């Protein structure tokens, strides 16, 4: 039996060649994602069994359980899922575009740009009583603007008759260090209220998510994810190297810029609603590559599902393990991600 299967959609106008093994693994990951989603929804001070959770999701659950799930738990878990998906896909795009397994939103300074804008926002709009003079609802917009601005800055500074992957990484590392320094400076010189609020956000958490957040995050995340899947062919070409990609007709610099914009947008919407949750964009693509191979047509969906699982699990552990205290999801992701990053450094030291 052939390893690949051809799918024809829209009366043969669209043809897709799928790897059977990769498709099966993605299906298994989808089932695991749904299982984690259900378990996470049922976990908390009020325990709800998985069957009841499923009934509630399909509109047939008891009134009390329906109220708890829809009003308090579902928005938070949906945000965690979509943030994990977005960060993982963004990390996969960056690793393919730069051809560096250590590339991630954290390394390139994009999340750092969002952090500076958030701390700056809290500082600029705080009064003498350390209270905000504008609605906290504007905070996600500040984070998104910061991520996009730094992404563009990194690209412009890396430009020299085009943008090479190594220059992009080096500039990104420098900008990341600068953003961390600026963030620390703003927190040290600002009021205690600002520093504590910023510190919670910088750790990365989905606490306080609501349906308004969901209504903004989900449409954009879905749109960017679809665009990323459509751009999988470009990523496959980028991984071949500039000379080979150019020889195959790829407009390398133009597509590299567009891919950077796409990854920055994914990072921006993620950090805007969940803060700087680190290492998801680094870990998820690596795990996916081990499972489905390096073809981005399968790698990006697998990365997305793994990213969603990682953030949902981190949030689940954070709000149940030390109950009634709540630990931000970013703490657990960093606890796993930092050793994993060191492992990758050792693995690639002779590469």
Image (cartoon, rainbow, N blue to C red):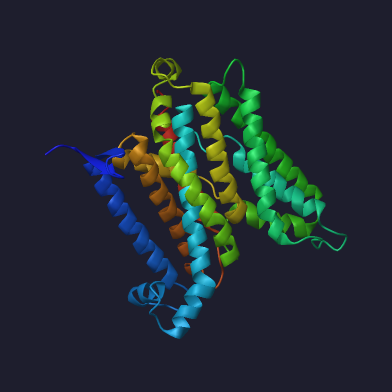
Q: Is residue 137 left or right of residue 220?
A: right
Res. 126 image quadrant: bottom right
Q: Is residue 112 left or right of residue 119?
A: left
Q: Please say if 15 is above or below 324.
A: above
Residue 319 in sight from this viewpoint: no
Residue 41 in sight from this viewpoint: yes
Considering every residue shown, the one lying at the far bottom of the view is 63
Residue 83: percent from left, percent from top = 51, 53
Q: Along the line of sight, which residue is nearer the eye, 57 or 164?
A: 57
Q: Please say if 283 is above or below 174.
A: below
For image coordinates 72% across by 44% down, the residue present is 184
Q: Please say if 323 is above or below 256.
A: below
Q: Along the line of sight, which residue is nearer the eye, 121 or 351?
A: 121
For image coordinates 40% across by 35% down, the residue present is 232
Count the labels in the image.
Answer: 0
Q: Along the line of sight, which residue is nearer the eye, 250 or 300?
A: 250
Residue 87: percent from left, percent from top = 50, 46
Residue 289: percent from left, percent from top = 34, 38
Residue 94: percent from left, percent from top = 49, 34
Considering every residue shown, the one lying at the far front of the view is 11
Q: Please say if 329 is above or below 168.
A: below
Considering every residue shown, the one lying at the far left of the view is 1
Question: Which quarter of the rendered picture does the N terminus lie within?
Answer: top left
Question: Which quarter of the rendered picture does the C terminus lie within?
Answer: top left
């Amino acid at each position: 039996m052939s390893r690949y299967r051809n799918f024809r959609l829209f009366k043969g106008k669209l043809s897709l060649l799928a790897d059977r093994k990769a498709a099966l693994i993605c299906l298994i990951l989808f089932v695991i994602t749904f299982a984690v989603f259900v378990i996470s929804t049922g976990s908390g001070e009020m325990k709800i069994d998985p069957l009841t959770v499923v009934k509630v999701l399909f509109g047939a659950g008891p009134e009390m359980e329906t109220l708890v799930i829809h009003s308090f738990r579902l928005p938070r878990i949906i945000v965690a899922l979509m943030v994990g998906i977005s960060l993982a896909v963004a990390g996969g795009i960056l690793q393919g575009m730069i051809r560096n397994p250590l590339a991630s939103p954290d390394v390139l300074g994009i999340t750092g740009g969002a952090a500076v804008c958030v701390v700056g926002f809290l500082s600029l709009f705080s009064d003498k009583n350390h209270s905000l003079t504008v609605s906290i609802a504007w905070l996600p917009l500040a984070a998104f603007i910061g991520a996009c601005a730094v992404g563009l800055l990194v690209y412009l500074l890396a430009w020299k008759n085009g943008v090479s992957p190594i220059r992009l990484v080096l500039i990104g590392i420098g900008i990341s260090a600068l953003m961390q320094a600026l963030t620390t400076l703003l927190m040290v010189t600002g009021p205690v209220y600002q520093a504590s609020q910023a510190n919670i956000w910088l750790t990365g958490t989905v606490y306080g998510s609501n349906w308004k957040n969901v209504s903004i995050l989900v449409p954009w995340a879905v749109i960017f994810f679809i665009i990323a899947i459509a751009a999988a062919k470009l990523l496959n070409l980028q991984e071949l190297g500039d000379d080979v990609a150019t020889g195959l007709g790829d407009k390398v610099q133009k597509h590299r810029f567009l891919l950077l914009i796409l990854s920055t947008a994914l990072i921006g919407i993620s950090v805007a609603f969940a803060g700087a949750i680190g290492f998801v964009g680094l870990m998820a693509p690596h795990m996916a590559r081990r499972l489905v191979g390096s073809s981005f047509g399968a790698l990006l969906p697998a990365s997305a599902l793994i990213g969603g699982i990682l953030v949902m699990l981190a949030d689940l552990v954070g709000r149940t393990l030390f109950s009634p205290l709540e630990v931000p999801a970013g703490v657990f992701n960093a606890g796993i991600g930092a050793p994993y990053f060191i492992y990758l450094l050792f693995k690639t030291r002779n590469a």
